[in-house]
Image (cartoon, helix red, strand yellow):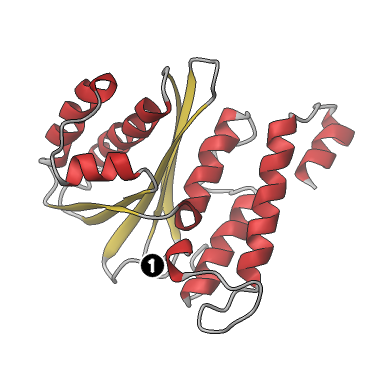
C-alpha cells in the first residue's frame, strides 16, 4: 500500500529491495497474527522466534545494524519498549562502513551514546541483538575481529558507565522491528518523526509482537 501510494501520488519509483522488504514484513505480520506458540499447525513459531517483553521496570532495547554490500553505506536502528510492549523511544542513524560486522558494532556504540545522552545510566536496560558475535564478544570479553577492535574498546568503556545494563542474543525473528527499521532507513523510507508517528508497516509489527507476548494493547498512545 505505501509503495503503491508513493508511486501513484508522489511519482516515487519503488526500489526492488524495498518492495521485497515490505512483502517480507507483511508475511511476517500475517504469520505472527496466526501464531499460537502453545498450539499446533503450519503457522506455529518457536518461542525464540518471538519478541518477549522485559520484566516490569525494565526497558528492552532491540538493536540492529544493516550493511549494503558493494557500498560504504551502513544504517542502524534501536527500538525501546517497556514490559507492555509500548514503544517508548528509538533511534535511527546512517554511517560509513565497509563490513556488516562494523555495522553491528556501530549499532551498539551509537545506541549506548544515545542512552547516555538521555540520562539512562541508572535505568534498568536490556539490549538485544541478533548478532551472536557482537553479543558474545561483549559478554565474554573475547578478542574481537581486528576490523572492529576500536569499536569494541569504545563499547566496553561505555558499558561501564551504566549501573543496570545487560546485553542478550536473540533470534532475528525476535528482533524483526529493529531489523526492518534499519533497512527502511537504508532504503530512504522512514521519516525522522517515526517514534511519534510510526509508519503502518512498523505499527503492524509492533502490534503483532505485543499480541503474541500477551501484553496490554495500549502500548502506543
Q: Position of residue 51 (x, y in %)?
A: 45, 63
| Residue 189, picture quadrant | top right
Closer to us: 161 or 194: 161
Q: Quadrant of residue 96?
A: top left
Badge 1 element = loop
Relative horizontal placement of residue 200, taking residue 59 as reference (left or right): right
Residue 87: where, in percent of width, then height? 46, 57
Badge 1 crowding class, 10 Å Cα cut-off, few under 14, some 14 to 19, many 20 or more, is many
Image location of residue 91, percent across then percent down: 43, 39
Residue at 34% x, 57% y is 60
Could you tell me which residue is drawn at 80 percent across and 35 percent down?
A: 6
Q: Which residue is mark 1?
A: 53
Seen in the image, is 111 located left or right of residue 47?
A: left
Judge whether residue 72 can be spotted in this image: yes
Q: Residue at x 58, y 66 (%)?
A: 208
The x and y percentages for residue 3 are 78, 39
Residue at 10% from the left image edge and 41% from the top image edge: 160
Amino acid at each position: 500500500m505505501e509503495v503503491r501510494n508513493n508511486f501513484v501520488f508522489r511519482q516515487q519509483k519503488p526500489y526492488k529491495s524495498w518492495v521485497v522488504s515490505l512483502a517480507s514484513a507483511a508475511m511476517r505480520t500475517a504469520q505472527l497474527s496466526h501464531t499460537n506458540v502453545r498450539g499446533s499447525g503450519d503457522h506455529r513459531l518457536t518461542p525464540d522466534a518471538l519478541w518477549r517483553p522485559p520484566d516490569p521496570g525494565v526497558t528492552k532495547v532491540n538493536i540492529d545494524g544493516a550493511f549494503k554490500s558493494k557500498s560504504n553505506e551502513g544504517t542502524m536502528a534501536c527500538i525501546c519498549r517497556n514490559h507492555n510492549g509500548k514503544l517508548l523511544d528509538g533511534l535511527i542513524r546512517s554511517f560509513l562502513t565497509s563490513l556488516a560486522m562494523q555495522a553491528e558494532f556501530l549499532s551498539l556504540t551509537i545506541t549506548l551514546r544515545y542512552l547516555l545522552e538521555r540520562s539512562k545510566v541508572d535505568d534498568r536496560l536490556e539490549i538485544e541483538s541478533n548478532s551472536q558475535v557482537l553479543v558474545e564478544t561483549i559478554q565474554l570479553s573475547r578478542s574481537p575481529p581486528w576490523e572492529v577492535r576500536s569499536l569494541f574498546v569504545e563499547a566496553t568503556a561505555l558499558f561501564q558507565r551504566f549501573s543496570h545494563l545487560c546485553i542478550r542474543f536473540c533470534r532475528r525473528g525476535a528482533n524483526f522491528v529493529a531489523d526492518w527499521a534499519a533497512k527502511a532507513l537504508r532504503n530512504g523510507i522512514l521519516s525522522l518523526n517515526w517514534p511519534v508517528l510510526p509508519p503502518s508497516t512498523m505499527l503492524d509489527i509492533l502490534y503483532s509482537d505485543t499480541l503474541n507476548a500477551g501484553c496490554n494493547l495500549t502500548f502506543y498512545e
